[in-house]
Image (tube, rainbow, N blue to C red):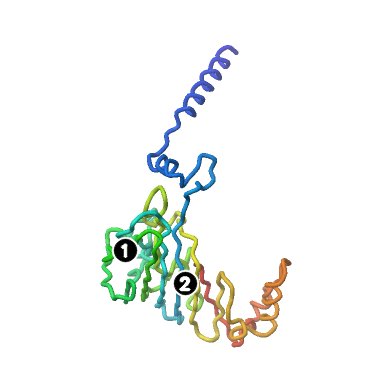
Amino acid sequence: MKIVSLLLIFTGFTFSSKTQNLYWPRDVKKAYKNETRSNDGWPGKKYWQNSARYKITITATPPDRNIKGSEQISYINNSPDTLNVLVFKFIQNIHKPGAPRLGSADPDYLTDGVHIDAFTVNGETTTWNDREYSPTVQFTRLSKPLLPHDSIQLSFDWHFQISLKSGREGMIDSTTYFLAYFYPRVAVYDDYNGWDDLDHNDALEFYNDFNDYILNIKVPRNYIVWATGNLQNANDVLQPAYVQRLNESMKTDRNIHIATANDIAAKNITKQNDVKYLDVCL
């Protein structure tokens, strides 16, 4: 009994000693000093976040594996810092041979990644240079720095081949695609770590700004699209009964089943027959 008592006292003393000398990373200390973070876990009185508005259009025409996209980005620098470079995430490049990842990749998983067809900064055509050493993280140096509380206008045209293997994203079968991480996005620039320039390794989830999105999806007429967001043209693509249910769901807190399992099996949701599916996740 004496040995147990002494062991407990020693363990308690060690724990107490460690909690009094907890290491604080220098970047975190700096954030507290700058008052962007606070000791109680709440944002500090000088906290800020950068943000963007994305307008994206993508085209998918299964069984063609090529996914084509274009986007306009209005990126807002809410930080007190002048930004000389912009960092981007190209998560689809995890499929490129040689990309750093935690696990192995079979041939059906691999593609040649994202191809940038056009890139502009504030309306000026700019040469895009891929950096092969870090496929999922790319950057561009700005000819004119982005000042604090200013914004910059960007645009991309791009295409890639969807992976034959479905996991987080990819082909479920020849006529059913699951699209995720499909668009170039500006990486997070935050108050204590600067740019998030960590590679995607195909296992861990992501750090992202809170942004606004307008997404247009072009698919064959007999496809139904599953996606997050508010559908803007329900009358154009859905049967009247489902438009009515969708409108009802916007006016109440009750759960309303817009489409049941039987509806999906019967494939009578859209205005076309022989429905196939495209799942999109921002």
Q: Which residue is mark 2?
A: 171
Secondary structure of residue under mark 1: loop
**How crowded is the residue under tag 2: few (<14 C-alpha within 10 Å), some, or many (20+)?**
many
Is 257 or 246 nearer to us in this picture?
246
Residue drawn where x is 53% and y is 86% of the image: 221
Residue 171 in percent (x, y) is at 47, 72
Residue 204 in percent (x, y) is at 45, 54
Which of the 4 image quadrants contains residue 57? Answer: bottom left
Residue 197 in percent (x, y) is at 35, 55
Is 234 or 41 nearer to us in this picture?
41
Q: Which mark is residue 97?
A: 1
Residue 253 in percent (x, y) is at 72, 66
Q: Amino acid at mark 2?
A: Met
Is 30 or 265 nearer to us in this picture?
30
Q: CA distance from mark 1 to mark 2?
A: 18 Å
Is 76 or 198 nearer to us in this picture?
76
> Is 19 drawn above or below residue 110 in the view shown?
above
> Is 191 drawn above or below residue 25 in the view shown?
below
Q: Looking at the rendering, in which quadrant would you find the N terminus?
A: top right
> Is 208 drawn above or below residue 172 in the view shown?
above
Asked if the residues shown at circle 1 and circle 2 are in contact, with their CB atoms under 8 angstroms apart, the answer is: no
Secondary structure of residue under mark 2: strand
Whether residue 220 sits left or right of residue 140 in the image: it is right
Of labels 1 and 2, earlier in sequence is: 1
